[in-house]
Amino acid sequence: MVYEYDLIVIGGGAAGLTAAGMGANFGAKTLMIEADKLGGDCTWHGCIPSKTLLHVSKVSQTLTEAEKYGFQSGGVIDFSTVMEHIRNTRQEVYEEADDPEIYRNMGVEVKFGRASFVDSHSVIIKTQKGEEEISARYIIIATGSKPMVPPIPGLDDISYLTNETIFELEEQPESLGIIGAGPIGIEMAQAFQRLGTQVTVFDRLSRILSKDDKELAEMLQERLEKEDIDFKLSASVNRLSEIPCGNIKVETEINGKSSTWEGSEILVATGRTANYERLQLENAGIHYQKNGITVDDRCRTNKKHIYAVGDVTGRYQFTHMSEHMAKVAATNALLKIPMKIDENHVPWSTFTDPELAHVGATEKELQENGTSYKTYRFPYDKIDRAITEGATEGLIKIFAKKMTGKILGATIYGKQAGDLIGEYALAMRNGVTLRNMADTIYPYPTYGLGARRAADQWYIQSQSTWMVKLIKWLFGYRGTVPDLSDEDRII
Ligand SMILES: Cc1cc2nc3c(=O)[nH]c(=O)nc-3n(C[C@H](O)[C@H](O)[C@H](O)COP(=O)(O)OP(=O)(O)OC[C@H]3O[C@@H](n4cnc5c(N)ncnc54)[C@H](O)[C@@H]3O)c2cc1C
Ligand SMILES: NC(=O)c1ccc[n+]([C@@H]2O[C@H](COP(=O)([O-])OP(=O)(O)OC[C@H]3O[C@@H](n4cnc5c(N)ncnc54)[C@H](O)[C@@H]3O)[C@@H](O)[C@H]2O)c1
């Protein structure tokens, strides 16, 4: 059978752009179909606007703290200018990385319209002008996700914000209630609070950022509380309603006690739903579950020539994982090289100030799996660069094998944590141990040197008095045997 294309990619977000670009690079006749604008959630409603807003809020915080360094502060924020800056920034990213012409120049054909399956090799593209049916040998589905809106009574009757609308605000809310203390809720909480909105965060769980290390997430929560963010955790949000002055009322129950909150806006940040309902997956016989399209470790669906990547699979919801999965799918489909998702080294970072980042196994996973490990800790207040920058709040925690220094997981709360975690991702992926890191020369004074000092902990904690006694005996040294009981010593 002759198909019109070697590869059709449905969706032009982080996953689709990568898959289509790789298709063209491998010499496949590639078509990318996008229902809206190329760039997807990351460019338009996700990473780019949220990180830009966080940056602006950090500038605001720096101005507030500037008096400590002798500056006269007192800046006033013009919210509409802030929002215009955010929109300009995402336009800049779109033009630099997502513009259809960039992909056309690479050899990718780009069509705009909504795609759905006709059968397992054909899709129909619906546009305002009409319909077009197209076939391909391979298909990669990369249709992403959208906000999951929970069925809370009254929610449908009020106007609420999601990540798709919050960056379109023109007026700064006086107060903002956020339902959900995951990465979206926590990043937006700090950003808006620092810009002068009074933020309250509700979550049904008893802690924030439940996928992160408990100890470090608690440190971040404490920091956010110091910035006056109000947390209502273990809260069952029972009803939302609009009250006569136009404000929103949230009725909650916390540990059996009812309470109400009233404020100007509500952001719903309670997770994501995969975008697959309108794809007519049944026509192609593709299996899916509630959380997304089912794929194996090579990103293949049950139809061996159809792959799914990124948020639509419900497996990982990060831009870097969308790109990684796209690479896995394109490599398997077009080069026939078996490549699997690298599940053991998935990093992530929440870009609050300070940041909270993680890679590999969590301590909870290690405990549940009965894996033997030792925790190596190094605080930011012993990193000279952090001291010079007044950023001493933070902790590096590494989970590693005691004998070999093999790194099993790492988690960092502190300045530049999102960048530092990449160091551990590289180390783990390539079998670099704590011993290797400790023997590596890092420039002084850097945050990276904190990673080296954290690795030194492996040597330090491997020291023992009997070893010192052996050295003394071997070389005839006359010093005393040191007290090695202080686990926090740095040499
Ligand atoms: C507020 C927020 C902040 C975030 N911050 C980060 C971060 O800092 N770091 C990080 O790694 N991740 C972050 N994420 C997650 C990240 O944005 C997503 O994981 C990533 O965008 C998913 O990419 P994707 O290509 O799978 O899907 P999407 O980006 O959603 O792209 C899917 C595309 O498919 C199109 N489409 C859908 N259906 C069809 C159809 N039937 N036909 C044609 N086209 C279709 C859509 O229009 C869309 O353009 C954030 C998310 C949010 C919401
Ligand atoms: N920096 C980053 O990498 C970054 C930033 C933002 C988002 N993201 C991605 O986007 C995804 C979605 O983020 P998210 O924060 O929306 O989802 P999430 O699933 O991570 O967190 C949602 C939170 O909402 C709570 N919740 C759900 N329903 C509730 C209800 N009815 N009442 C009270 N609380 C409720 C949950 O307990 C949970 O804590 C993340 O998983 C992440 O992968 C990444």
Image (spheres, grey):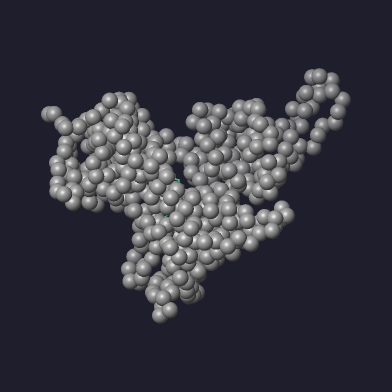
Query: Residue 472: image x %, image y %?
Result: 81, 24
Q: In this rendering, would 40 be left or right of 452?
A: left
**Relative to 20, does residue 190 appear above or below in the rendering?**
below
In the rendered image of this protein, does residue 159 appear above or below residue 271?
below
Q: Is residue 254 visible?
A: yes
**209 and 350: which is toward the camera:** 350
Q: Dividing the picture into quarters, in which one does residue 375 lie? A: top right
- Furthest toward the top, the residue is 475
Residue at 43%, 50% (x, y): give it.
88
Residue 409 visible in this rendered orientation of the protein: no
**Numbered disc total:** 0
Residue shown at 24% from the left, 52% from the top: 277
Residue placed most toward the observer, 105 or 179: 105
Which residue is at the far bottom? 244
Q: Is residue 136 left or right of residue 449?
A: left
Residue 376 picture location, percent across and down: 63, 39
> What residue is at 84 percent from the left and 20 percent from the top?
476
Q: Residue at x 43, y 79 (%)?
A: 245
Which quarter of the figure is the C terminus placed in?
Answer: top right
Q: Is residue 112 above or below residue 251?
A: above
Quarter of image, res 461: top right
Q: Is residue 358 left or right of residue 128?
A: right
Q: Position of residue 149 (x, y in %)?
A: 35, 61
Q: Give the left or right position of residue 474, taking residue 318 as reference.
A: right
Locate residue 323, reporting x and y percent.
38, 38
- The quarter of the image holding the N terminus is top left
Furthest toward the right, the residue is 478
Residue 15 or residue 131, whichever sits in front? 131
